[in-house]
Image (cartoon, rainbow, N blue to C red):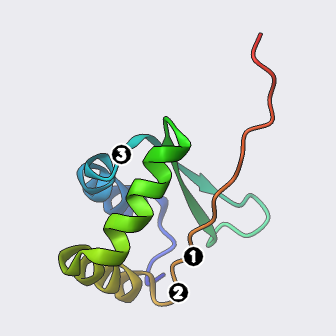
Amino acid sequence: MPSADPAYVRSVVQATAPFYGLLGGTSMRLLRNVDDPAQFIQEIVYETPEAVEMSRQRIAGDLRIQSFLQAWRQVLGGAVTLEVWEDLTESA
């Protein structure tokens, strides 16, 4: 990323929040690696597995989203990876 300044990274992530909301994201967090302060992870939470799959399909099929992601990769100075994690925490 061109700048490891947390305020800059936070402002870029906040600017993308409406975009992820359109794709079904319900919340978002920005995490910084304490051992490598220049490394950040943006976590986007989806309410249901169906919302994640819908988002993947929309990303793959929408040229506007592809253009946005290409611009996002340029801002980040590298690859953007998408990982899907399953929450195994038991509900209380």
Residue 52 marker: none
Q: Return the residue found at the far left.
A: 64
Of callouts 3 and 1, the N-terminal one: 3
Q: How many marks?
A: 3
Q: Quadrant of the C terminus?
A: top right
Q: Can you tell which of label 3 and label 2 is closer to the viewer?
A: 3
Q: Is residue 20 left or right of 29 when viewed as pictured?
A: left
Report the residue at 49% width, 52% height from top. Answer: 52
Q: Secondary structure at mark 3?
A: loop
Task: Tell me if residue 40 comes above or below residue 43 in the rendering.
Answer: below
Q: In the rendered view, does 41 fall on the left or right side of 91?
A: left
Q: Residue at x 29, y 58 (%)?
A: 16
Under mark 3, the amino acid is Gly
Q: Residue at x 51, y 38 (%)?
A: 48
Mark-to-mark CA distance, 1 and 2: 6 Å
Residue tagged by mark 2? 79
Secondary structure at numbered mark 2: loop
**Residue 46 x/y as whole percent:** 49, 42
Secondary element at image label 1: loop
* As drawn, 2 above or below 37: below
* Residue 33, horizontal then vertical, whole percent: 71, 61
Q: Residues within 10 Å of mark 2 (few under 14, many from 20)?
A: few
Residue under circle 1? 81
Q: Are marks 1 and 2 in contact (CB under 8 Å)?
A: yes
Q: CA distance from mark 3 to mark 1?
A: 18 Å
Q: Amino acid at mark 2?
A: Ala
Residue 38 % position (x, y)? 61, 72
Of residues 5 and 85, the one nearer the viewer is 85
Quick check: 52 above or below 47?
below
Q: Amino acid at mark 1?
A: Thr
